[in-house]
């Protein structure tokens, strides 16, 4: 221990690197932060089925949705609403269902009245609106016992559950 010498005193402070905190980007957006557009030219007829699935969704999940095997946690009936009312109701309903942690919900849009238009307006609007919502993974027409082509099962993402503050 003869060769051990104390360190020379220094006026320099030893700085430890700061831990960087970051905000995790949520996979959901407040309803006021996104708007559902109406500019869609596709026309789905009364008897046709709806279907949409995000890229990468497993076939087994899609099959389970089409068979109606997910438990339905909430239901929204859009009968008798105008397009604007249906848009607002859809947005609020799906946002609330997503935040509540619901995995699958049922949306009843109806088959449309042939006397008023040649195609069901709300069905076509839902077919256009639902893919615009970031937390909608997939949707398809319901089984006949739950509304058939007049209703749709909607599969939602699970909300972010984390232990850190955002």
Image: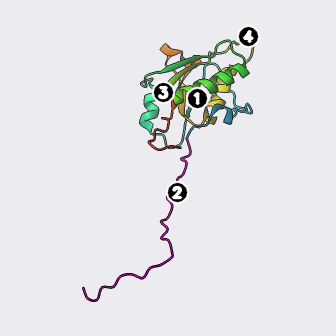
Splitting the image into 4 quarters, where does residue 48 fall? top right
Q: Earlier in the sequence, mark 3 or mark 2?
A: 2
* Residue 43 in picture, x, y percent from top left: 69, 27
Label 2: element kind: loop
Asked whether disc 3 touches disc 2, contact meaning CB atoms under 8 Å apart, the reply is no
Residue 95: mark in rendering: 1
- For the record, the magenta segment spans 1-26
Instruction: Find residue 112 and report its image quarter.
Output: top right
Spatial separation of the CA atoms under disc 3 and disc 2: 33 Å
Real-space CA distance between mark 3 and mark 1, rounded to the nearest whole angstrom:
10 Å
The percent coordinates of residue 80 (x first, y second) are: 68, 12
Q: Is residue 113 above or below residue 95?
A: above
Going by the image, does 52 lie left or right of 86? Answer: left
Q: Is there CB contact under 8 Å for labels 4 and 2?
A: no
In this view of the protein, which residue sits in the foreground, 73 or 26?
Answer: 26
Give the SS element for disc 1. Answer: helix
Residue that badge 2 annotates = 20
User: Mark 3 against mark 2, which lies toward the viewer?
Assistant: 2
Closer to the chain start, of discs 4 and 3, is 3
Q: Nearer the viewer, residue 127 or 104?
A: 104
For disc 4, the marked residue is 115
Residue 30 horizontal/vertical position (percent)? 62, 34
Disc marking residue 124: none
Q: Give neighbour class at mark 2: few <14, some 14-19, many 20+ (Cα, 10 Å).
A: few
Q: Mark 4 vs mark 2: which is more N-terminal? A: 2
């Amino acid at each position: 221990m003869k060769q051990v010498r104390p360190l020379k005193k220094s006026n320099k402070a030893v700085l430890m690197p700061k831990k960087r905190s970051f905000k995790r980007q949520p996979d959901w957006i407040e309803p006021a932060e996104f708007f559902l557009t109406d500019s869609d030219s596709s026309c789905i007829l009364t008897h046709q089925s709806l279907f949409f699935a995000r890229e990468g969704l497993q076939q087994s999940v899609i099959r389970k949705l089409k068979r109606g095997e997910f438990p339905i946690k909430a239901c929204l009936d859009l009968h008798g609403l105008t397009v604007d009312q249906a848009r607002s109701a859809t947005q609020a309903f799906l946002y609330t269902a997503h935040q509540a942690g619901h995995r699958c919900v049922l949306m009843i849009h109806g088959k449309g009245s042939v006397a008023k238009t040649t195609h069901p307006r709300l069905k076509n609007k839902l077919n256009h609106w639902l893919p615009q919502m970031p937390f909608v993974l997939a949707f398809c027409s319901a089984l006949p016992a739950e509304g058939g082509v007049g209703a749709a099962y909607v599969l939602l993402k699970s909300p972010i559950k984390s232990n850190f503050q955002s």
